[in-house]
Image: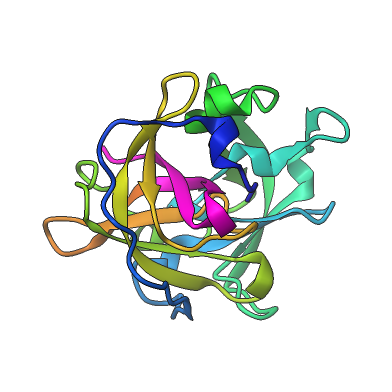
Amino acid sequence: MRLLAIVPIALVLLTMPIAAEAGSVRAPVDMATPPWTALGRVQTELGTRCTGFLIAPSVVMTAAHCLFRRVTGHYVQPGSVHFLWRYDRGAYADHARVTAFTVAPGYDPFRELQTLGLDRAFLTLDHPVGTADDDVHFAPAAPQIGAPLLLGGYNRDHDEVLEADRCRLRGFAVDHGGHRLLVHDCYGEPGTSGAALFSQAPDGRWAVAGLEVAVTGPGGTIGLAEPLAN
């Protein structure tokens, strides 16, 4: 996940953020237990590693910038992208190759500050992974300020295991193009891009409220996610 400085982004806060919680604690999760059942590692044959999650047995959502190569100015070939479902220390529940991917309309990797809120991609897998019961549920509405959140991803410093952090929604913002973003204080490093940001739905289940796209602030202490709630 890219590390973005808060001054160049000049995010416009739409609400007053709450105070950050004192110290975050990351811990490995049981990937056979909800809400982690849908997650896995997205990686390219060129070495890029991000996080992704199943929204259907053959479709994974992740961050679009994970598929873009700045050295060439082009996206990677779909066939060079792999999804390792429930990856953990070299083992995984299934391995699928990507046959095609679609980037969200409007996202421009050359204009990141204007399109950060559109930074998502949908990967089509070469075979179904798991069942519909393993797919994520989407939150019925955006979380409110102060709502508890969960973020789990393959952070660069421990990228062989999916670690999760519990935090809260600090506020909302918009990128330079006016696209909304969720602002939170869950910990994230490069590799967590594309991870699902979970909030608790009225029925008690943890459901996807956003997709992690960037961090900013001192030491990457502020996370930015695209809102995905229905």
| Image position of 223 (left or right of 204) | right
- Closer to us: 86 or 218: 218
Q: Residue 192: which quarter of the image?
A: bottom right
Q: How is the image coloured?
A: rainbow
Q: Position of residue 135 (x, y in %)?
A: 39, 56
Identify the main secondary structure in magenta.
strand
| Image position of 168 (left or right of 70) | left
Q: Is residue 133 magenta?
A: no
| Image position of 59 (left or right of 148) | right
**Residue 130 visible at all:** no
- Indicate whether 137 appears above or below 106: below
- Closer to us: 177 or 69: 177
Please report the residue visible at 78 percent of the width from the left and 38 percent of the height from the top: 76
Q: Position of residue 228 (x, y in %)?
A: 35, 40
- Closer to us: 6 or 127: 6
**Residue 151 visible at all:** yes
All told, the count of numbered labels is 0
**Where, quadrant-wise, is the C terminus in this rendering?**
top left
Please report the residue visible at 56 percent of the width from the left and 35 percent of the height from the top: 7
Q: Position of residue 215 (x, y in %)?
A: 54, 49
- Closer to us: 51 or 112: 112
| Image position of 58 (left or right of 43) | left
Please report the residue visible at 41 percent of the width from the left and 73 percent of the height from the top: 23
Which region of the structure is painted magenta? Answer: 210-230
Q: Residue furthest right?
A: 72
Q: Residue furthest left?
A: 202
Q: Position of residue 136 (x, y in %)?
A: 36, 55
Please report the residue visible at 45 percent of the width from the left and 71 percent of the height from the top: 164
